[in-house]
């Protein structure tokens, strides 16, 4: 079983994503546990303070060392983390390979940044991995953390009903997924490719591979090194 702990100042933002669909089933099956921890439980005063002005001046508050260090160290007493991940715009861009690798871990702690981010000393001392989900800035790391947990969780063996489903997703083999069709075979004159209706698994597999390459060349040539 995998356990993912998330340290955040806004746990309510993360309650819904893990209570529905695949993430809900993963937890019901006992394959994944997602625990939310409110950083304000380790605040430095009765006012719930976890941030302060940045040294050197400038707009924006910075999440302080003391609450983060105390929270991380207390959680580390409960379990040994394989990775302590900080969600940040300047982290390594998240991709399917990273999701695959993280899905093999047992215990992960994710720190959600806010404001201008967290004190660099926390990053230097505790964080083992820094992840960005794209070249843009969000109000906080919670939505990014939800994306990462969803991408990881669905890869855990037994989570998806069809084990081959995750293996044929986009990016698993550096290719985008081919087009897919379902009934009816003819919708307003738009027909499903004949090869998908002929019942020859080998020909279907070859067609899908060709279509995956074509779609990748058209939409993401960088994945094929063709940029």
Image (cartoon, rainbow, N blue to C red):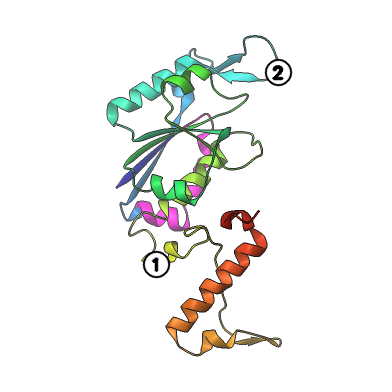
| Depth order, front residue of 121/5 | 121
Pointers 1 and 2 in contact (C-beta within 8 Å): no
Examine the rendering and report whether any part of residue 178 can be seen: no
Q: Is residue 59 magenta?
A: no
CA–CA distance in space, label 1 to label 2: 49 Å
Look at the numbered disc 2 and give the secondary structure of its residue. loop
Examine the rendering and report whether any part of residue 226 can be seen: yes
Name the main secondary structure of what is drawn in magenta: helix
Q: Residue at x 62, y 67 (%)?
A: 215
With respect to residue 186, does 70 lie above or below? above
Image-based side of 99 in relation to 211, left or right: left
Q: Position of residue 183 (x, y in %)?
A: 56, 83
Few, some or many C-alpha atoms within 10 Å of disc 1 (few <14, some 14-19, many ≥20)? Answer: few
Look at the numbered disc 1 and give the secondary structure of its residue. helix
Q: Residue at x 51, y 40 (%)?
A: 145
With respect to residue 125, does 25 lie above or below? below
With respect to residue 111, does 177 lie above or below? below
> Which region shows up in magenta?
7-27
Q: Which residue is mark 2?
A: 59
Q: Position of residue 166 (x, y in %)?
A: 43, 61
Q: Position of residue 21 (x, y in %)?
A: 47, 58
Q: Which residue is mark 1?
A: 164
Q: Is residue 17 magenta?
A: yes
Q: Residue at x 43, y 83 (%)?
A: 201
| Depth order, front residue of 47/224 | 224
């Amino acid at each position: 079983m995998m356990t993912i702990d998330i340290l955040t100042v806004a746990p309510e933002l993360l309650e819904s994503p893990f209570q529905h669909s695949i993430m809900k089933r993963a937890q019901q099956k006992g394959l994944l546990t997602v625990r939310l921890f409110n950083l304000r439980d380790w605040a430095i005063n009765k006012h719930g303070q976890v941030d302060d002005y940045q040294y050197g001046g400038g707009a924006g508050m910075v999440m302080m060392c003391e609450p983060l260090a105390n929270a991380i160290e207390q959680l580390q007493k409960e379990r040994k983390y394989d990775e302590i991940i900080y969600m940040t715009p300047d982290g390594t861009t998240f991709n399917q390979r990273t999701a695959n690798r993280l899905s093999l871990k047992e215990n992960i702690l994710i720190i959600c940044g806010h404001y201008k981010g967290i004190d660099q000393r926390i990053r230097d001392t505790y964080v083992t991995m820094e992840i960005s989900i794209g070249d843009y800035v969000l109000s906080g790391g919670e939505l990014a953390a939800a994306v990462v947990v969803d991408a990881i969780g669905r890869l855990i063996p037994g989570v998806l009903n069809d084990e081959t489903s995750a293996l044929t997703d986009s990016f698993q083999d550096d290719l985008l997924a081919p087009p897919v069709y379902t009934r009816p075979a003819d919708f307003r004159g738009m027909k499903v490719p004949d090869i998908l209706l002929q019942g020859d698994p080998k020909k279907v597999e070859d067609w899908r591979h060709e279509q995956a390459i074509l779609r990748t060349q058209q939409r993401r040539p960088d994945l094929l090194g063709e940029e």
